[in-house]
Amino acid sequence: MIRRTPMSAVAQGAAALALVACSSVTDASETPRVTLLIQRTSDSGIIAPSVSVSGQDVVVRGTFSTPCLGYGVSATARQTADALVVTLSGRQGGEICLTAIGRFPYIGTVSGASSGTRTVVVRHVIEDANWPVDTVINTRVVIP
């Protein structure tokens, strides 16, 4: 059962600071490094999903939604022979869950991807709720 209590201004500020930067993780030997910046904003600040290429960097943008406030967000990237898969995962911090949906606009930069034509897939996963995996980007790009 989720305990729902009002969040104090101090707790809100601490939650916002915790979401300003997200450490990146990678797996496998040919995996590019992920740099992901997460900023919390109001509903009017929703970023539509998009992907662009700048040199060998692949930049993804979007808004990650969570069932309530108080979620931490992490990111991973995996490169295969023909795809670059970025997964943003959310997990509740365990303290409180306000009924408002959390929205976290982000800009993620995948550095070091191999040259060639690749399918870029961006998935949003809520690890501890019964929400389906949301594929927000699935498109082909050419990395020089």
Image: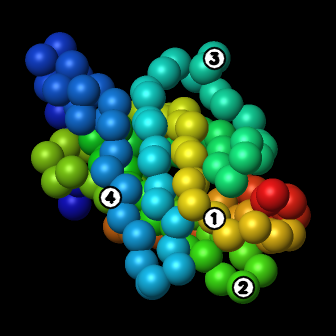
Write the residue at 53% across / 80% down: 30
Viewer-nearest of discs 1 and 4: 1
Q: Residue beneath label 2, please?
A: 81
Q: Residue at x 57, y 60 (%)?
A: 112
Looking at the image, residue 25 sits to the left or right of residue 11; the answer is right
Q: Which residue is mark 3?
A: 44
Kind of residue at badge 1? Ala
Amino acid of disc 3: Ser
Instruction: Give the spatial CA distance, label 1 vs label 3.
Output: 33 Å
Label 2 environment density (alpha carbons within 10 Å; few <14, some 14–19, many ≥20): few
Marks 4/2 in contact by CB < 8 Å: the verdict is: no
Measured in 3D between alpha carbons, the distance from the residue under mark 3 to the one under mark 4, in whole angstroms, is 24 Å
Which circle, 2 or 3, is nearer the viewer? 2
- Disc 4 element: strand
Q: Give the numbered dot on residue 113.
A: 1
Disc marking residue 91: 4
Q: Are marks 1 and 3 in contact (CB under 8 Å)?
A: no
The amino acid pointed to by label 2 is Ala
